[in-house]
Image: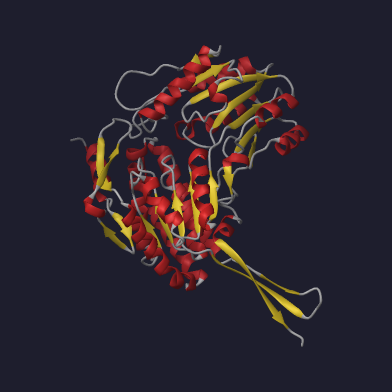
Amino acid sequence: MDQSRVDEARVVEAVEKRLFIDGKWTDATRGATFDVVDPSTGEVLCAVADASPADGRAALEAAVAAQPDFARTSPRERSDMLMTAYELLIERADELALLMTLEMGKPLAEARGEIAYAAEFFRHFAGEAVRIDGGYQTAPAGNARFLITKQPVGPCLLITPWNFPMAMGTRKLGPAIAAGCTSVIKPAHQTPLSMLALMGILAEAGVPAGAVNCVTAMDAGGVMEPLIRSGLARKLSFTGSTRVGRILLEQCAEKVLRTSLELGGNAPFVVFEDADLDEAVTGAIAAKMRNMGEACTAANRIFVHESAIDEFGRRLAERMAALTVGRGTEPGVNVGPLIDEAGREKVRTLVADAVGRGATVLTGGEVAPGGGFFYPPTVLTGVPREAAMADQEIFGPVAPLTPFSTEDEVVRAANDTEYGLVAYVFTNDLRRALRVAESIETGMVGLNQGVVSNPAAPFGGVKQSGLGREGGAVGIDEFLETKYIGIAVSG
């Protein structure tokens, strides 16, 4: 066995594969397990504990029991926990990145970038922990004072997706810990190893038993729905599809759980005739190809002014064709596999539909033979508005180009979707940039840039892309309740 395979086996072996409940590693009920698969080969990496509803209940009860004491910890203590975890993530970035690449597929360089990004949420919320504020004011009548304070919401249920298996966890756990909320986190069954590794880091960083618990499960609904309906949890934070988000929102309504939902996207990427085409192409690569296109922020509909679409398409196709596809652990690879065969089949179906409706393939479009769930970087031009990919997240390395002629036309097209997470706009006209950014119905806009995600900025969408915001100064507010105390000062 060559050294690289030895290193891979070592990092997988080092991860605990049991449930993390009340500060202890424990087997699932009846010792049940499920397999974790390497998407670049289709081979099994290992097996991890498969939680039952009873296991989920035990985790939530541990969080409930730990809540009073954890809420009483000082902001500085919680800040120090997060800073220690930040330092441990940075210190172990190479091993954690390799683990992520093995279970999820992204190239090592991207995985290292995600570890740094994930760690930054802990550093950011370490600062927010000591800045939780309130207020004091005089009542209008002058006979009382208003004391405004903020307190932790209480035990939280956190559900994370497979595409950013570390960062989506730290984006939720960071503010929960900073606010003094205990939690039960359930990672996606495709990528549980990164989150299990994070549990060990948080314990090492001094997070007390029961404050953070982790259950891994194949039957997410079977385990989490009883917890949502139990009345023991006070908040749900979920990142995933709009379809599942709607179901969870209905479940939360029964006990009126506070909810944060970061759901699907259908991001428009708009290139006006006055844009710097090199800058726009570079932005399109960033917005489209991050994580092989498997991101809710991925450019899903690329609108290019009719005077520039041919040249933009040529340059983009040239750049996309030059990307190297392969196993994420191999040197020089830019594009890893998709998460599974179902994900690849969805991409293949959407491309076939667009071509069948008149789109032209400029590069890619055909699955290469061999193992793993790979799909080549693909550029389509002349994609009609009625193509299925205009309404569905592609979640793959496919860039569909559609021409437009006027600003009003493209704004209407950009808003013609139930989603509203992020949009990208490329223009050198400042007035137009502001008009369009304000007119597009999304929670975030990238102006002349293809990446908007930043732990210090509020991340979230409008319409059916979700509720609430993660990150930024407002991210911790999702985990805090505002309490008003009225104080009489006159008889």
In x, y percent, where is residue 72? 48, 73
Horizontal side, residue 296 vs residue 160: left or right: right
| Outermost residue, right side | 141
Identify the residue at horizontal 37%, vertical 59% (top origin).
213
Residue extending farthest bottom: 491
User: In this view of the protein, which residue sits in the foreground, 177 or 121?
Assistant: 177
Q: Does residue 335 appear in this view? A: yes
Q: Quadrant of residue 423?
A: top right
Scheme of image coloration: secondary structure
Q: Quadrant of the N terminus?
A: top left
Nearer to me, 99 or 485: 485
Compared to residue 353, the image places residue 207 above or below, namely: below
Residue at point 47%, 72% (across, down): 73
- Residue 119 appears anywhere in the view: no
User: Furthest-left residue in view?
Assistant: 1
Identify which residue, 324 or 247, lies in the foreground.
247
